[in-house]
Amino acid sequence: KNQVEQSPQSLIILEGKNCTLQCNYTVSPFSNLRWYKQDTGRGPVSLTIMTFSENTKSNGRYTATLDADTKQSSLHITASQLSDSASYICVVSHRAGGSYIPTFGRGTSLIVHP
Amino acid sequence: DSGVTQTPKHLITATGQRVTLRCSPRSGDLSVYWYQQSLDQGLQFLIQYYNGEERAKGNILERFSAQQFPDLHSELNLSSLELGDSALYFCASSVGGGANQPQHFGDGTRLSIL
């Protein structure tokens, strides 16, 4: 069964600190892995998209890594800001015939305190 | 602002009823995706259309149907509504229909079934 597990469920950090969120998946055959940021009451916003051959992708203070062998990904946030408080969702897509089907993790809720 | 417009923002109705949710994609985007986000299930992929044709199907119930019109807007029809259909319904759009296309999400329609 295709599954995406994220940890921790929630995280509280102080402004200016770094943090790392984890994503483990059993999705097969792997197509791509995305990280989204979702503010409360808003739609998700894409942070990174990685294919099988990519092991690092950055977007400003956000850096995602992918280890396709161990089926793990991480999202590292550098020098956190209050506006980073949000849910971070890992999504892994697999190929099914001619289409691509995403499986979503339940997200990590990040709170950044001043 | 993602450029994806969803209407209405909120919808309250009763069990057994039928509703239609509407999505206008970003200008130039040919692909539209529908997702459901509930407290117990998280985000789930429902269906994707590309240039008017169904491209991929996820966990969409038989009571639900969607279509994409020649002007590229899309509608999601939910019928015989049940309490468990209460959720946020998101639409996203992308330029193409391929696996690695960045998707831009609207802010959703919140559906409440009484």
Image: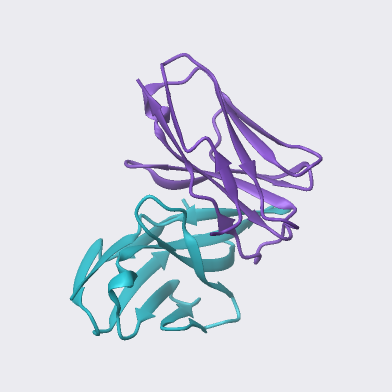
Chain colours: A cyan, B purple
Q: Residue furthest top?
A: B16
Q: Is residue A55 left or right of residue A39?
A: right
Q: Quadrant of residue B87?
A: top left
Could you tell me which residue is drawn at 42 percent across and 53 percent down?
Answer: A42
Number of numbered discs overlaid on the protein picture: 0
Location of residue A11 in the rendering, given as x and y in whole percent from the top left corner: 22, 68
Q: Is residue B45 left or right of residue A74?
A: right
> Is B68 in front, or is A102?
B68
Q: Is residue A47 left or right of residue B86?
A: right
Location of residue A108 in the rendering, given as x and y in whole percent from the top left corner: 31, 63
Q: Quadrant of residue B93?
A: bottom right
Location of residue A84 in the rendering, given as x and y in whole percent from the top left corner: 33, 71
Could you tell me which residue is drawn at 39 percent across and 76 percent down?
Answer: A75
Q: Residue furthest front?
A: B1
Location of residue A53 in the rendering, given as x and y in whole percent from the top left corner: 60, 81
Above or below B31: residue A70:
below
Q: Is residue B14 left or right of residue B64?
A: left
Q: Residue furthest right?
A: B70
> Is B45 in front, or is B91?
B91
Above or below A97: residue A72:
below
> Is A46 in front, or is B48?
A46
Q: Looking at the figure, which quarter contains the C terminus of chain B?
A: top left
